[in-house]
Image (spheres, grey):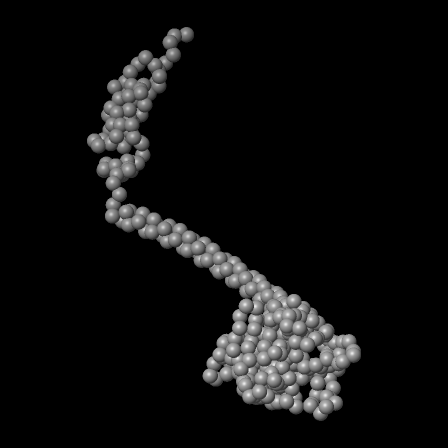
Amino acid sequence: MSASPSYPGGPGSSSYPDRQPAAPSYPGPSGSGPAYPGRPVSAPAYPGQPVSGPSQPGAAYPGPPAPMGGPAGPASRRSRVAVVALALAAVLTVVTGVQAYQIYRLDDRLAAADKRMAEGQGADAGRLDGLEQRAGSLEKQADAAFNPEAVASAVLPSVFRVRAGQFTGTAFAVGKAPSGGGTTLLTNFHVVESVFTAGERKVFLERKDQRFEATIIATDKDKDLAQLQTTAKFTGLVAARAPVRSGQQIIVVGAPLGLQDSVTTGVVSAFREDERGGGPVIQFDAPINPGNSGGPVINGSKEVVGIATAKARNAEGIGLAVPIKTACDRFRLC
Protein backbone atom coordinates (compact mmCIF):
# COMPACT_ATOMS: atom_id res chain seq x y z
CA MET A 1 0.00 0.00 0.00
CA SER A 2 1.03 3.52 -0.51
CA ALA A 3 1.80 6.02 2.19
CA SER A 4 -0.82 6.72 4.88
CA PRO A 5 -3.09 9.56 4.27
CA SER A 6 -2.79 12.76 6.35
CA TYR A 7 -5.54 14.62 7.87
CA PRO A 8 -5.83 18.17 8.60
CA GLY A 9 -4.54 18.77 12.04
CA GLY A 10 -2.96 15.38 12.41
CA PRO A 11 0.69 14.49 12.73
CA GLY A 12 2.71 14.23 9.69
CA SER A 13 5.16 15.88 7.56
CA SER A 14 2.70 18.27 6.12
CA SER A 15 2.50 21.62 7.72
CA TYR A 16 -0.24 23.94 7.87
CA PRO A 17 -0.08 27.58 8.12
CA ASP A 18 -2.37 27.67 11.09
CA ARG A 19 -0.44 25.14 13.17
CA GLN A 20 2.12 26.07 15.93
CA PRO A 21 5.47 24.48 16.60
CA ALA A 22 5.67 21.49 18.93
CA ALA A 23 7.18 23.56 21.76
CA PRO A 24 5.15 26.56 22.59
CA SER A 25 6.93 29.71 23.64
CA TYR A 26 5.81 32.52 25.85
CA PRO A 27 6.94 36.02 26.03
CA GLY A 28 9.39 36.66 28.88
CA PRO A 29 12.83 35.68 30.00
CA SER A 30 14.05 32.32 29.17
CA GLY A 31 15.57 29.86 31.53
CA SER A 32 15.73 26.33 32.59
CA GLY A 33 12.45 26.48 34.43
CA PRO A 34 9.26 28.37 34.23
CA ALA A 35 9.24 31.90 35.54
CA TYR A 36 6.40 33.45 37.40
CA PRO A 37 5.81 37.03 38.25
CA GLY A 38 7.17 37.89 41.77
CA ARG A 39 9.22 34.68 42.14
CA PRO A 40 12.96 35.24 42.73
CA VAL A 41 15.56 33.61 40.64
CA SER A 42 19.26 33.25 41.18
CA ALA A 43 19.71 36.95 40.63
CA PRO A 44 17.74 39.62 42.50
CA ALA A 45 14.53 40.43 40.68
CA TYR A 46 13.69 43.64 42.52
CA PRO A 47 15.74 46.61 43.55
CA GLY A 48 16.75 46.72 47.29
CA GLN A 49 16.08 43.03 47.89
CA PRO A 50 19.10 41.10 49.31
CA VAL A 51 20.57 38.47 47.14
CA SER A 52 21.06 35.73 49.69
CA GLY A 53 18.19 36.71 51.98
CA PRO A 54 14.95 34.88 52.39
CA SER A 55 12.75 34.44 49.36
CA GLN A 56 9.49 35.20 51.12
CA PRO A 57 8.04 38.66 51.00
CA GLY A 58 8.51 40.68 54.22
CA ALA A 59 11.34 38.49 55.58
CA ALA A 60 13.83 41.37 55.63
CA TYR A 61 13.45 45.12 55.91
CA PRO A 62 15.95 47.78 55.34
CA GLY A 63 16.97 49.75 58.54
CA PRO A 64 19.76 50.18 61.15
CA PRO A 65 20.86 47.09 63.10
CA ALA A 66 19.99 46.76 66.86
CA PRO A 67 22.66 48.06 69.31
CA MET A 68 24.89 45.35 70.84
CA GLY A 69 26.98 46.25 73.96
CA GLY A 70 26.87 49.99 73.52
CA PRO A 71 27.08 52.48 76.52
CA ALA A 72 24.24 52.17 79.07
CA GLY A 73 21.74 54.90 79.44
CA PRO A 74 20.71 56.84 82.66
CA ALA A 75 17.86 54.45 83.43
CA SER A 76 20.20 51.46 83.38
CA ARG A 77 22.67 53.20 85.78
CA ARG A 78 19.88 54.10 88.19
CA SER A 79 18.70 50.52 88.16
CA ARG A 80 22.17 49.20 89.02
CA VAL A 81 22.59 51.78 91.84
CA ALA A 82 19.23 50.76 93.33
CA VAL A 83 20.22 47.08 93.22
CA VAL A 84 23.56 47.80 94.94
CA ALA A 85 21.82 49.94 97.59
CA LEU A 86 19.31 47.19 98.31
CA ALA A 87 22.14 44.66 98.60
CA LEU A 88 24.06 46.90 101.02
CA ALA A 89 20.92 47.50 103.06
CA ALA A 90 20.34 43.76 103.27
CA VAL A 91 23.95 43.18 104.38
CA LEU A 92 23.71 45.94 106.99
CA THR A 93 20.45 44.49 108.26
CA VAL A 94 22.02 41.06 108.63
CA VAL A 95 25.12 42.49 110.36
CA THR A 96 22.97 44.58 112.70
CA GLY A 97 20.85 41.58 113.54
CA VAL A 98 23.91 39.44 114.25
CA GLN A 99 25.42 42.15 116.47
CA ALA A 100 22.15 42.64 118.31
CA TYR A 101 21.95 38.89 118.93
CA GLN A 102 25.56 38.81 120.12
CA ILE A 103 24.89 41.76 122.47
CA TYR A 104 21.79 40.00 123.76
CA ARG A 105 23.79 36.83 124.42
CA LEU A 106 26.56 38.89 126.04
CA ASP A 107 24.01 40.60 128.28
CA ASP A 108 22.70 37.20 129.30
CA ARG A 109 26.19 35.96 130.07
CA LEU A 110 27.00 39.12 132.03
CA ALA A 111 23.77 38.80 133.98
CA ALA A 112 24.55 35.17 134.71
CA ALA A 113 28.10 36.11 135.76
CA ASP A 114 26.75 38.88 138.03
CA LYS A 115 24.32 36.43 139.56
CA ARG A 116 27.05 33.88 140.17
CA MET A 117 29.28 36.60 141.63
CA ALA A 118 26.50 37.81 143.90
CA GLU A 119 25.81 34.25 145.01
CA GLY A 120 29.52 33.70 145.59
CA GLN A 121 29.79 36.94 147.56
CA GLY A 122 26.78 35.94 149.60
CA ALA A 123 28.31 32.57 150.30
CA ASP A 124 31.64 34.23 151.17
CA ALA A 125 29.87 36.68 153.45
CA GLY A 126 28.07 33.79 155.13
CA ARG A 127 31.35 31.94 155.59
CA LEU A 128 33.01 35.11 156.94
CA ASP A 129 30.14 35.62 159.37
CA GLY A 130 30.49 32.03 160.45
CA LEU A 131 34.24 32.45 160.88
CA GLU A 132 33.75 35.66 162.86
CA GLN A 133 31.24 33.96 165.09
CA ARG A 134 33.57 31.04 165.61
CA ALA A 135 36.46 33.44 166.28
CA GLY A 136 34.34 35.32 168.79
CA SER A 137 33.33 32.06 170.42
CA LEU A 138 36.97 30.96 170.55
CA GLU A 139 37.96 34.30 172.03
CA LYS A 140 35.32 33.93 174.70
CA GLN A 141 36.50 30.42 175.38
CA ALA A 142 40.08 31.66 175.54
CA ASP A 143 39.03 34.42 177.91
CA ALA A 144 37.12 31.92 179.97
CA ALA A 145 40.16 29.64 180.07
CA PHE A 146 42.23 30.59 183.05
CA ASN A 147 45.68 31.83 182.03
CA PRO A 148 47.65 33.05 185.08
CA GLU A 149 50.57 34.19 182.93
CA ALA A 150 48.41 36.44 180.76
CA VAL A 151 46.54 37.79 183.78
CA ALA A 152 49.75 38.53 185.69
CA SER A 153 51.35 40.25 182.68
CA ALA A 154 48.34 42.52 182.35
CA VAL A 155 48.04 43.57 186.02
CA LEU A 156 51.62 43.69 187.34
CA PRO A 157 52.39 47.24 186.01
CA SER A 158 49.54 48.54 188.21
CA VAL A 159 50.66 46.84 191.47
CA PHE A 160 53.21 48.37 193.90
CA ARG A 161 54.94 47.66 197.16
CA VAL A 162 53.89 50.19 199.80
CA ARG A 163 56.35 51.38 202.39
CA ALA A 164 54.69 53.09 205.33
CA GLY A 165 57.28 53.80 208.03
CA GLN A 166 58.65 50.46 209.17
CA PHE A 167 55.85 48.43 207.58
CA THR A 168 55.48 47.16 204.01
CA GLY A 169 52.49 45.92 202.15
CA THR A 170 50.87 46.11 198.69
CA ALA A 171 48.74 48.71 196.90
CA PHE A 172 47.24 48.80 193.36
CA ALA A 173 45.89 51.45 190.98
CA VAL A 174 42.17 51.22 190.36
CA GLY A 175 39.49 52.98 188.35
CA LYS A 176 39.80 56.15 186.33
CA ALA A 177 42.19 59.00 187.05
CA PRO A 178 40.85 61.59 189.52
CA SER A 179 39.68 64.97 188.23
CA GLY A 180 42.88 66.67 189.43
CA GLY A 181 45.10 64.12 187.64
CA GLY A 182 47.34 61.42 188.99
CA THR A 183 46.25 57.95 190.13
CA THR A 184 44.00 56.52 192.84
CA LEU A 185 45.16 53.40 194.72
CA LEU A 186 43.72 51.02 197.31
CA THR A 187 45.38 49.12 200.17
CA ASN A 188 44.56 47.86 203.68
CA PHE A 189 44.24 50.25 206.59
CA HIS A 190 46.52 48.14 208.77
CA VAL A 191 49.31 48.61 206.16
CA VAL A 192 49.36 52.42 206.67
CA GLU A 193 47.94 52.48 210.19
CA SER A 194 51.20 53.47 211.96
CA VAL A 195 51.73 56.45 209.66
CA PHE A 196 48.11 57.53 209.78
CA THR A 197 47.95 57.20 213.59
CA ALA A 198 51.10 59.30 213.90
CA GLY A 199 49.30 62.08 212.05
CA GLU A 200 51.30 61.70 208.90
CA ARG A 201 49.87 61.11 205.45
CA LYS A 202 52.89 60.37 203.26
CA VAL A 203 53.78 56.86 202.12
CA PHE A 204 55.87 55.57 199.23
CA LEU A 205 55.08 53.36 196.27
CA GLU A 206 57.93 51.21 195.05
CA ARG A 207 58.25 49.26 191.87
CA LYS A 208 61.57 47.84 190.81
CA ASP A 209 64.03 50.77 190.92
CA GLN A 210 61.34 53.47 190.98
CA ARG A 211 59.77 55.21 193.97
CA PHE A 212 56.72 57.46 194.00
CA GLU A 213 55.26 59.52 196.84
CA ALA A 214 51.61 58.93 197.69
CA THR A 215 49.13 60.50 200.13
CA ILE A 216 46.58 58.84 202.40
CA ILE A 217 43.32 60.62 201.58
CA ALA A 218 40.69 58.32 203.17
CA THR A 219 40.49 55.31 205.52
CA ASP A 220 37.96 52.84 206.96
CA LYS A 221 39.40 50.99 209.93
CA ASP A 222 36.37 48.69 210.39
CA LYS A 223 36.58 47.44 206.82
CA ASP A 224 40.40 47.59 206.82
CA LEU A 225 40.54 49.89 203.78
CA ALA A 226 42.66 52.91 202.85
CA GLN A 227 42.64 55.12 199.77
CA LEU A 228 45.87 56.59 198.41
CA GLN A 229 46.59 59.10 195.69
CA THR A 230 49.75 59.93 193.74
CA THR A 231 50.58 62.51 191.12
CA ALA A 232 52.20 59.83 188.96
CA LYS A 233 50.05 58.33 186.24
CA PHE A 234 49.38 54.58 186.15
CA THR A 235 46.77 52.39 184.49
CA GLY A 236 43.94 51.58 186.88
CA LEU A 237 42.68 48.01 187.12
CA VAL A 238 39.03 47.29 186.37
CA ALA A 239 36.74 46.27 189.23
CA ALA A 240 34.59 43.19 188.65
CA ARG A 241 30.86 43.89 188.69
CA ALA A 242 29.72 40.30 189.09
CA PRO A 243 30.20 38.70 192.54
CA VAL A 244 32.67 35.86 192.86
CA ARG A 245 31.54 32.24 192.86
CA SER A 246 32.90 29.29 194.77
CA GLY A 247 35.40 27.42 192.65
CA GLN A 248 36.24 30.47 190.54
CA GLN A 249 39.94 30.58 189.71
CA ILE A 250 41.92 33.60 190.88
CA ILE A 251 45.46 34.92 191.25
CA VAL A 252 46.83 37.09 194.07
CA VAL A 253 49.55 39.65 193.28
CA GLY A 254 51.65 41.28 196.01
CA ALA A 255 54.94 41.68 197.82
CA PRO A 256 55.04 38.96 200.49
CA LEU A 257 57.94 39.63 202.87
CA GLY A 258 58.80 42.56 200.63
CA LEU A 259 59.26 40.43 197.51
CA GLN A 260 57.78 42.50 194.68
CA ASP A 261 55.70 41.12 191.80
CA SER A 262 54.91 37.83 193.50
CA VAL A 263 52.00 35.87 192.01
CA THR A 264 50.10 32.96 193.55
CA THR A 265 47.08 31.09 192.20
CA GLY A 266 44.07 29.40 193.72
CA VAL A 267 40.28 29.30 193.72
CA VAL A 268 37.53 31.02 195.63
CA SER A 269 36.66 28.75 198.52
CA ALA A 270 33.59 30.58 199.76
CA PHE A 271 31.86 33.93 200.01
CA ARG A 272 30.95 34.46 203.67
CA GLU A 273 30.25 37.04 206.37
CA ASP A 274 33.12 38.30 208.49
CA GLU A 275 32.67 37.06 212.03
CA ARG A 276 33.96 40.38 213.33
CA GLY A 277 31.07 42.22 211.72
CA GLY A 278 33.12 43.97 209.08
CA GLY A 279 30.86 42.76 206.25
CA PRO A 280 31.18 39.95 203.71
CA VAL A 281 34.60 38.49 202.91
CA ILE A 282 36.00 36.27 200.18
CA GLN A 283 37.71 33.09 201.29
CA PHE A 284 40.32 31.73 198.89
CA ASP A 285 43.06 29.11 198.99
CA ALA A 286 45.91 30.93 197.18
CA PRO A 287 48.97 31.19 199.47
CA ILE A 288 49.56 34.64 201.01
CA ASN A 289 52.03 35.94 203.60
CA PRO A 290 52.78 39.19 205.44
CA GLY A 291 53.35 41.79 202.76
CA ASN A 292 50.47 40.50 200.55
CA SER A 293 48.06 42.70 202.54
CA GLY A 294 46.42 45.27 200.28
CA GLY A 295 47.20 43.32 197.11
CA PRO A 296 44.56 42.66 194.40
CA VAL A 297 42.73 39.33 193.99
CA ILE A 298 42.17 38.95 190.20
CA ASN A 299 39.82 36.69 188.21
CA GLY A 300 40.49 35.10 184.82
CA SER A 301 39.10 38.18 183.03
CA LYS A 302 41.80 40.40 184.60
CA GLU A 303 39.28 42.09 186.89
CA VAL A 304 39.74 42.84 190.57
CA VAL A 305 37.35 40.84 192.74
CA GLY A 306 38.84 41.62 196.17
CA ILE A 307 41.66 43.05 198.30
CA ALA A 308 43.78 40.48 200.16
CA THR A 309 43.66 41.35 203.84
CA ALA A 310 44.51 38.40 206.14
CA LYS A 311 45.20 34.71 206.49
CA ALA A 312 44.06 32.24 209.08
CA ARG A 313 46.59 31.48 211.80
CA ASN A 314 47.73 27.95 212.37
CA ALA A 315 46.12 26.87 209.07
CA GLU A 316 47.07 26.53 205.44
CA GLY A 317 45.14 27.62 202.40
CA ILE A 318 42.72 29.96 204.16
CA GLY A 319 43.07 33.54 202.97
CA LEU A 320 40.56 36.37 203.28
CA ALA A 321 39.84 39.35 201.03
CA VAL A 322 37.56 42.38 201.21
CA PRO A 323 35.21 42.40 198.17
CA ILE A 324 36.09 45.14 195.69
CA LYS A 325 32.48 46.32 195.71
CA THR A 326 32.83 47.19 199.40
CA ALA A 327 35.80 49.47 198.67
CA CYS A 328 34.17 51.04 195.58
CA ASP A 329 31.00 51.82 197.53
CA ARG A 330 32.90 53.13 200.55
CA PHE A 331 35.14 55.54 198.60
CA ARG A 332 32.87 56.09 195.61
CA LEU A 333 35.34 54.66 193.17
CA CYS A 334 35.27 52.23 190.23
x%, y% of residue 136? 63, 70
Q: Position of residue 28 (x, y in %)?
A: 24, 25
Query: Horizontal placement of 200 versus 53: left or right?
Result: right
Question: How many labels sit on residues?
Answer: 0
Find residue 148 and report its horizontal and vertical position in percent: 67, 69
Quadrant of the frame with the N terminus: top left
Q: Nearer the viewer, residue 45 or 30?
A: 45
Residue 326 percent location from the top left of the image: 64, 87
Extreme residue toward the bottom, this view: 277
Q: At 57% from the left edge and 62% from the top edge, which residue is drawn?
A: 120
Q: Is residue 101 visible to the viewer in this orientation of the structure? A: no
Q: Is residue 240 left or right of residue 103?
A: right
Is 77 placed above or below 169 here?
above
Q: Quadrant of residue 219?
A: bottom right
Instruction: Tell me the quarter of the picture where residue 218 sits.
Output: bottom right
Question: What residue sits 53% from the left and 60% below the top?
Answer: 113
Q: Residue at x 31, y 20 (%)?
A: 32
Q: Tell whether 180 sits left or right of 157.
A: left
Q: Nearer the viewer, residue 68 or 176?
A: 176
Which of 314/225 is in front? 314
- Image quadrant containing the C terminus: bottom right
Q: Quadrant of residue 252?
A: bottom right
Residue at position x 66%, y 76% in the image = 291
**Eyeballing the image, is 319 above or below 139?**
below
Left or right of 95 in this view: 297: right
Residue 111 in view here: yes
Q: What is the residue that sits farthest to the left in this orientation?
A: 47
Q: Is residue 72 above or below residue 262?
A: above
